[in-house]
Each structure stands twice: as structure tokens, then as C-alpha cells.
């Protein structure tokens, strides 16, 4: 049975599909398509994190999010240290999420 995806997958997925005795059709994305598909993949992976029901599931899905973020940083020419520095600056300026504050309304 044929199934259509049209989504970015990890580099070894075509080989894994072949090793299972199946076949697949794929192409190598150009720069613009790759960037677009990375952001689609980020949304997909974040959605999967939100659907997790156990700590083990969360760990695996967060690892997938990090993999996509690493690829986006590479495409955007941003290094991890710069992102962590900005994250730290924002935490100092605006705080983190440790206090679990839920803003209900302002006036």
C-alpha cells in the first residue's frame, strides 16, 4: 500500500525503509524548500512533545526537537552558544517559567 508524506525525514530513513524490504521515492531539497520543511518539521515535533503521556516519550520527542533546532541553527548561521546567551539574557530580563505563573488578565 502506497502512502504519501512530502515531509522532511532524517538522513537514514530511506536506507531503513529499504532494509525493511520496502521502497520509497524521495528528492533532495533545495535551500528554500529545506528551510520551509525544517520549520514544518519543528511544528510537527513540538506537537508530538505536547501529546506525550510519559517521561520516556517526552525525552525522545525533545531529542527530536533538538535535532531540528540544530539543523535550523545551521541553516540560519546561528551557533548554539549565541542562542544560549540570548536565552540567559531573556531569563535575566523577563524571568523563566519556574514560578508557574498563569496570567489571567490585565487592565
Image (cartoon, rainbow, N blue to C red):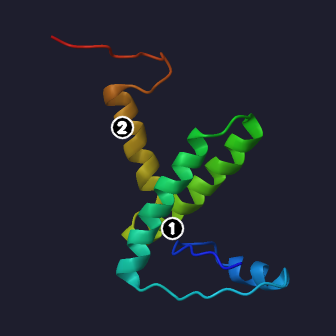
To which residue does mark 1 refer?
A: 71
**Quadrant assignment for the N terminus:** bottom right
Q: Nearer the viewer, residue 75 or 55?
A: 55
**Quadrant assignment for the C terminus:** top left
Label 2, label 1: how far apart the Cα atoms are: 23 Å
Identify which residue is drawn at 39% across, 82% down.
Answer: 31
Q: Tag 2's secondary structure?
A: helix
To which residue does mark 2 refer?
A: 89
Residue most extreme to the front: 1
Identify which residue is drawn at 40% across, 16% down.
Answer: 102
Measured from the top left, where is residue 51 in percent x and y? Answer: 61, 40
The quarter holding residue 52 reads top right
Identify which residue is drawn at 41% across, 54% down.
Answer: 82
Q: Looking at the picture, does residue 4 appear above or below residue 52? A: below
Q: Nearer the viewer, mark 2 or mark 1?
A: 1
In the image, is 47 to the left or to the right of 20? left
Q: Alpha-carbon neighbours of circle 1 within 10 Å: few (<14), some, or many (≥20)?
A: some
Measured from the top left, where is residue 74 in percent x and y? Answer: 46, 70
Q: Looking at the picture, does residue 7 appear above or below residue 65? A: below
Residue most extreme to the right: 20
The quarter holding residue 18 reads bottom right
Q: Tag 1's secondary structure?
A: helix
Measured from the top left, where is residue 50 in percent x and y? Answer: 56, 39
Identify which residue is drawn at 78% across, 78% down.
Answer: 16
Q: Nearer the viewer, residue 55 or 26?
A: 26
Q: Looking at the picture, does residue 28 appear above or below residue 66? A: below
Q: Earlier in the sequence, mark 2 or mark 1?
A: 1
Amino acid at each position: 500500500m502506497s502512502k504519501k508524506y512530502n515531509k522532511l525525514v532524517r538522513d537514514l530513513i530511506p536506507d531503513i525503509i529499504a532494509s525493511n524490504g520496502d521502497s520509497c521515492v524521495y528528492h533532495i531539497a533545495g535551500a528554500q524548500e529545506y528551510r520551509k520543511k525544517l520549520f514544518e518539521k519543528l511544528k510537527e515535533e513540538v506537537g508530538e512533545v505536547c501529546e506525550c503521556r510519559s517521561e520516556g516519550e517526552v525525552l525522545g520527542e525533545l531529542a527530536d526537537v533538538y535535532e531540528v533546532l540544530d539543523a535550523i541553527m545551521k541553516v540560519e548561521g546561528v551557533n548554539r552558544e549565541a542562542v544560549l546567551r540570548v536565552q540567559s539574557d531573556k531569563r535575566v530580563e523577563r524571568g523563566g517559567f519556574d514560578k508557574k505563573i498563569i496570567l489571567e488578565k490585565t487592565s
